[in-house]
Amino acid sequence: MIDYFAKHSDMLMSAFLEHLQIVFITLIISIVLAAVISYLLLKSKKATNITVNIFSQIYSIPSLALFALLIPLLGLGNKTAIPVLVLYNQYLLIRNIMTGMQQVDRSLLEAGTGMGMNKWQLVTKVQVPLAMPSIIAGIRLAIISTTGIATIAATINAGGLGKILLSGLRTMNTYKIAWGTILSVIIALVADMVLKLLEKKTKATKLNEI
Amino acid sequence: MIAVELKNVNKQFKGQTTPALDNVSVQIEEGEFVTVLGSSGCGKTTLIKMLNRLYEADSGEIFLFGKNIKEQNPVELRRKIGYVIQQIGLFPHMTVKANIATIPKILKWDKKRIDKETDRMLRLVQLEPDEFRDRYPAQLSGGQQQRIGLARALICDPRIMLLDEPFGAIDAINREILQNELKAIHQKSGRTYLFVTHDIREALKLGTKVIIMNEGKILQYDTPENIINNPANEFVENLIRTAELKGGA
Ligand SMILES: Nc1ncnc2c1ncn2[C@@H]1O[C@H](COP(=O)(O)OP(=O)(O)O)[C@@H](O)[C@H]1O
Ligand SMILES: [Mg+2]
């Protein structure tokens, strides 16, 4: 097992890094897009419910089907894989961002508006900081989900650890399958741990060391 | 100088059958401590929120220091008005200092000035800066929290203070102390205060003038003495009588 890794470390590491890259790029685009959509949704609770509902429907479409649908439009590889992964993340991110924002006490918003904060200041200085635990929980879910679904993207030539898994399956190479799995689990676990720490920290500042 | 003037202001909320404000007109001189008295739902909060444009009038005009508030940017307008609410509304993720300095930070005061002014405000509301500056709201008693709410509203030295039942949730002893402090702060500042309450004794004690409201209308606007001696109508007369009964007990 270790021998196999030593022998093929170049291949495994490059797939690992490729995978990390896909997850990272997906995450950045997802967060920016979800932030913009959430900001626009702040005005209307109804629009929020409808939007979250639509994204939850999309989230329930199997990834292979979505890939297949989008290949004719966007082609093979990351050009399709990343948009699909971003699309999936919108549900997890927007749902958590909006839940967190809506839970902020109304009297805080009234106090802020009444003292002369504009909408942007209210969002950035009050709502987002108070919604942070929920937002970070959403990002954690998005990382885990992206890491997993990205392996399936290998079927459309997107590269990453999915490539290792797929060729392992094809040639019945258990080492390949094992290493592909282990490395993707590592990505999810490490990201999960880091964000859990962050989540704890944001909660701690909110409630403070009483 | 007239600090606040309302001319035939009307406001009716969607889905309501009666107006929250019914053709309200009043002139308030600069420097007065006006208490707004009336039972729950009579339109006191609506009146206050009209002045900082949290609500917009259906008709009528509102002037602050001679300027129609409709012609002013609402955010700019609010920064010149102090606003304190019953729920206090301190930001739980910010320290006492950051709470008090919210608007000064937005206005980009320099750090030295912010430090100096937040400490001055803390002393003004009888809290020792070194002890309280770095605390979070959850580490304060209700009375201390409301003092911070007051300090936050006062830091930009607004010409008008709007206080909507600020002591409503505070126990009787602390309430008495806070009332006296607020009265002293007002007297020193010479600013115009509008203070909403449904407690007649609080209204008569604090107010240099009292607005008595019922069902969206102003029934009487006068000094506490005149209200006691010459109640405008039966409603006000009854109100005074209940207060005197309680006061004598
Ligand atoms: N945002 C609102 N939407 C609908 N109705 C409101 C709103 N605010 C106040 N009202 C109604 O207007 C009337 C006056 O309310 P308010 O000014 O809050 O009274 P008070 O502060 O004297 O208790 C009440 O009947 C209340 O139900
Ligand atoms: Mg009220």
Image (spheres, coloured by chain):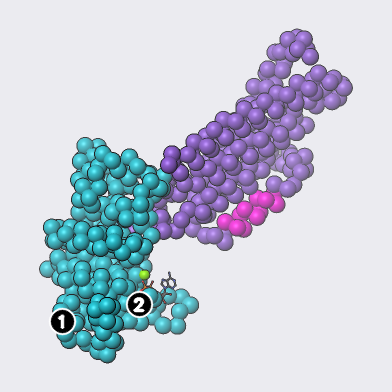
Question: Which one is nearer the viewer's eye here, A13 or A135?
Answer: A135
Which portion, as a residue range, is magenta? A48-58
Judging by colour alone, the chain drawn in purple in this rendered image is A
Q: Please, is residue A190 above or below residue A39 in the view?
A: above
Whether the magenta-drawn stretch holds residue A50 is answered as yes
Q: Quadrant of residue B81?
A: bottom left
Asked if the beta carbon under badge 2 is closer than 8 A to the nearest atom of ligand 1, the reply is yes
- The reply to the same-chain question for discs 2 and 1 is yes
Q: Position of residue A162 (x, y in %)?
A: 75, 28
Under circle 2, the secondary element is loop
The residue carrying mark 2 is B39
A14 lies left or right of B22: right
Residue at horizontal 61%, vertical 32%? A192
Q: Which mark is residue B70?
A: none
Amino acid type, residue under disc 1 in the picture: Asn
Q: Position of residue A2 (x, y in %)?
A: 75, 12
Q: Quadrant of residue B231?
A: bottom left
Q: Earlier in the sequence, mark 2 or mark 1?
A: 2
The residue carrying mark 1 is B226
Q: Disc 2 versus disc 1: distance between alpha carbons? A: 20 Å
Farthest front residue? B249
B22 lies left or right of A166: left
